[in-house]
């Protein structure tokens, strides 16, 4: 019975990959959310997370208002039935303990028919509804459930979609929607579409026909990423003769820009490129792409912070200074 196992393997792999997008290497979920966004903890119906500078800060709802309502941001007595993944009913369960549907360590105690109270098991233990006890984690079959974003995020809050630098999500009437920034990139910390240079992201979207059209594919060729001056995609020759649909992205070393003509990484002054010319530069002042070679950029942390003019002089990038000698760098040639 080889086949079913193989299929199961593939299904599992897909599942793991999907989950990986969300909790990649245990990274903080708050890296997706803008400053001071409050969401429900995907692992507990009783906890909220406030995202401060991309870091999770937890608060717990206790006592007779044990549930966190993501829409109002308040601790409540019960959640509307639409949030079914959190529904707990104390009907006919007075003085019993119920498992938290969103965590292995949480439980609810039914003080009476309609008052669940939230509690958690000690470190390294899981709640077991059958035995009504917290038992050692290794004896437990419980695994943390997956979650849907729109169960933890309220409507109209933008958050990052790691699949592309220009992509983000928003829940509309509880349904997850994909959105794209036009000609800009999504900045998770502010929840806005901003200039590409301001976003530290390697998941550059593929330009249209990046590896050529079906009638004339680029084979074993480097092409510009159309987002940075250093970045490029490698279009590999495909066995079936179609354009590479999944070209690998990479970037030139510091202080080199990608040049499509020579297919090499070369001196920035020799490359015409008007994306952020401060990206990957070690100098504080670099040539601007503005025609005439009289302008220069001030760089800070690999990002342009200002553009200035040498007036009647020309900016000499080697010297990092304005000089009277005429400059005719390719980068800024008229
Ligand atoms: C994020 O919010 C916190 C708390 O309101 C504030 O102290 C911090 O400066 C903010 N961070 C940024 C980058 O604005
Ligand atoms: C709870 O405990 C029972 C009895 O020990 C065990 O059979 C069952 O698998 C446990 N349930 C979970 C979810 O670990």
Image (cartoon, rainbow, N blue to C red):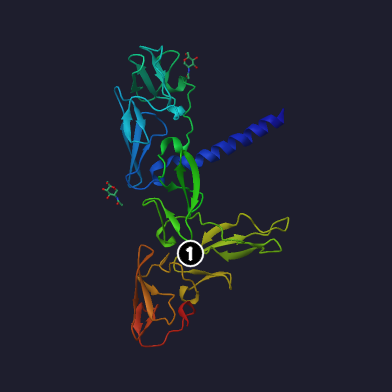
From this view, report whether residue 145 is shown above or below residue 222: above
Q: Position of residue 164 (x, y in %)?
A: 50, 52
Which residue in the protein does label 1 denote?
228
Residue nearer the viewer, 270 or 37: 37
Compared across the picture, whether 207 is left or right of 297 comes to right
Identify the image quadrant of the N terminus.
top right
Q: Is residue 28 visible?
A: no
Q: Is residue 49 visible?
A: yes
Quadrant assignment, res 123: top left
Compared across the picture, whether 298 is left or right of 234 comes to left
Q: Position of residue 258 (x, y in %)?
A: 52, 68
Circle 1 residues within 10 Å: few <14, some 14–19, many ≥20: many
Q: Position of residue 234 (x, y in %)?
A: 59, 61
Compared across the picture, whether 158 is left or right of 235 comes to left
Residue nearer the viewer, 229 or 283: 229
Residue drawn at x 49%, y 63% is 227
Residue drawn at x 71%, y 32% is 3
Q: Position of residue 268 (x, y in %)?
A: 47, 73
- Asked if disc 1 is less than 8 Å from ligand 1, the answer is no
Residue nearer the viewer, 33 or 261: 33
Residue farthest front in this picture: 173
Compared across the picture, whether 14 is left or right of 189 comes to right
Residue farthest bottom in this picture: 325
Residue nearer the viewer, 195 or 271: 195
From this view, report whether residue 80 is shown above or below residue 259: above
Q: Secondary structure at mark 1?
A: loop
Residue drawn at x 42%, y 36% is 152
**How many marks are shown on the rendered structure?**
1
């Amino acid at each position: 019975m080889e086949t079913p196992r193989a299929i199961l393997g593939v299904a599992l792999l897909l599942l793991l990959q999907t989950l990986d997008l969300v909790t990649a290497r245990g990274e903080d979920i708050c890296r997706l959310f803008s400053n001071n966004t409050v969401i429900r903890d995907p692992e507990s119906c009783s906890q909220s997370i406030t995202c401060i500078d991309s870091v999770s800060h937890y608060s717990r709802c206790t006592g007779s208002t044990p549930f966190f309502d993501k829409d109002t941001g308040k601790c409540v007595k019960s959640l509307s039935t639409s949030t079914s993944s959190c529904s707990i009913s104390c009907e006919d369960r007075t003085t019993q303990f119920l498992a938290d549907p969103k965590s292995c360590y949480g439980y609810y105690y039914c003080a009476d028919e309609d008052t669940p109270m939230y509690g958690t098991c000690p470190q390294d233990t899981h709640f077991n509804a059958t035995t009504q006890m917290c038992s050692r984690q290794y004896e437990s079959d419980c695994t943390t459930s997956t979650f849907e974003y729109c169960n933890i995020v309220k409507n109209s809050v933008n958050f990052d979609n790691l699949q592309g630098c220009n992509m983000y999500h928003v829940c509309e009437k509880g349904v997850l929607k994909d959105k794209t920034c036009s000609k800009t990139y999504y900045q998770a910390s502010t929840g806005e579409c901003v200039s590409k240079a301001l976003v530290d992201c390697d998941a550059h979207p593929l330009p249209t026909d990046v590896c050529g059209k079906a009638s004339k594919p680029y084979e074993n060729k480097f092409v510009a990423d159309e987002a940075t001056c250093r970045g490029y995609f490698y279009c590999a020759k495909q066995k079936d003769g179609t354009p590479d649909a999944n070209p690998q992205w990479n970037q030139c070393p510091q202080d080199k820009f990608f040049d499509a003509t020579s297919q090499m990484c070369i001196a920035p002054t020799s490359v015409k490129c008007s994306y952020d010319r401060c990206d990957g530069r070690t100098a504080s002042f670099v040539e601007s792409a503005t025609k005439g070679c009289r302008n220069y950029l001030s760089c800070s942390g690999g990002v342009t912070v200002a553009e200035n003019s040498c007036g009647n002089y020309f900016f000499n990038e080697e010297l990092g200074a304005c000089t009277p000698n005429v400059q005719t760098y390719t980068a800024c040639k008229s």
